[in-house]
Image (spheres, rainbow, N blue to C red):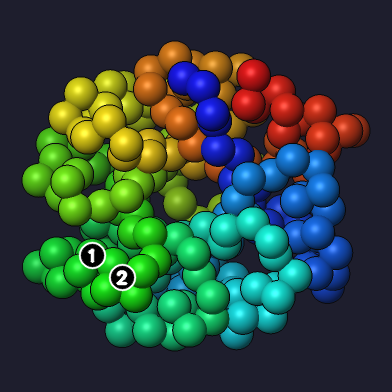
Amino acid sequence: MNNIIVSPSILSADFANLQSEVEILEKNGADWIHVDVMDGHFVPNLTIGAPVVKAIKPHANIPLDVHLMIENPQNYIEDFVKAGSDIITVHYEATGEFTEDIISNIKSHNVLVGLAIKPKTMPQDILKYLLMVDMVLVMTVEPGFGGQSFIEECAEKIPVIRQNAPENLIVQVDGGINEQTAKICKSLGVNSLVAGSYIYNSTDMKEAIKALKS
């Protein structure tokens, strides 16, 4: 697909210099900035919260793509909206009976809403929400840590989602994305790629981002 949105994950960034890290990503062709929020409960890692999103917002001229890997996300939507999130993605596995209410709440703030699924969650579980959300995020690793290997079977969910989704739905993948795995995902219908280690470990960040888009 054309117009691939590349959303580098700052999970791999230098947290002591997030302002410059965000500015460097933007300068090198990033379309969005992917912010991984982890609570140590929903996933086995603890990262950052709304105050950090608020701190980097003034330095980002591109959208902040905030991925909430947290329990009870309904309790924190207001905080992340006020912090300046442009996209808020919640996990289907964390929302339960509140899924529709959370989607409506995010949308009421004129913020784009994404719905993420873990590797063991089937796409059929979320088909009824595809007309309600702006983006579906297919995790191609178990969420929680960067630098993991791409789970190719997870990519098989992409055509199922794409075939049942409105044309303008953004389908994003996150986990083990590099130039090779990006090609697999794009061929199946993805139009947004999250990458951390691949971009930050490259010798030329600009070329790495360009390779994901091509």
Residue sitting at x 38%, y 59%: 112
Which residue has dot 1 on it? 103
Q: In the visual, does 94 lie left or right of 28?
A: left
Q: Nearer the viewer, residue 26 or 40?
A: 26
Q: Nearer the viewer, residue 176 or 114?
A: 114
Q: In the visual, does 15 lie left or right of 146?
A: right
Q: Is residue 69 visible?
A: no
User: Spatial distance from mark 2 to mark 1, Cα to Cα?
Assistant: 5 Å
Residue sitting at x 85%, y 64%: 20
Checking the image for residue 106, the label placed there is 2
Q: In the visual, does 17 lie left or right of 11?
A: right
Q: How many marks?
A: 2
Horizontal and vertical percent for residue 35? Answer: 57, 61
Callout 1 amino acid: Ile
Q: Secondary structure at mark 1?
A: helix
Callout 2 amino acid: Ile
Instruction: Establish if 214 lies above or below 107.
Output: above
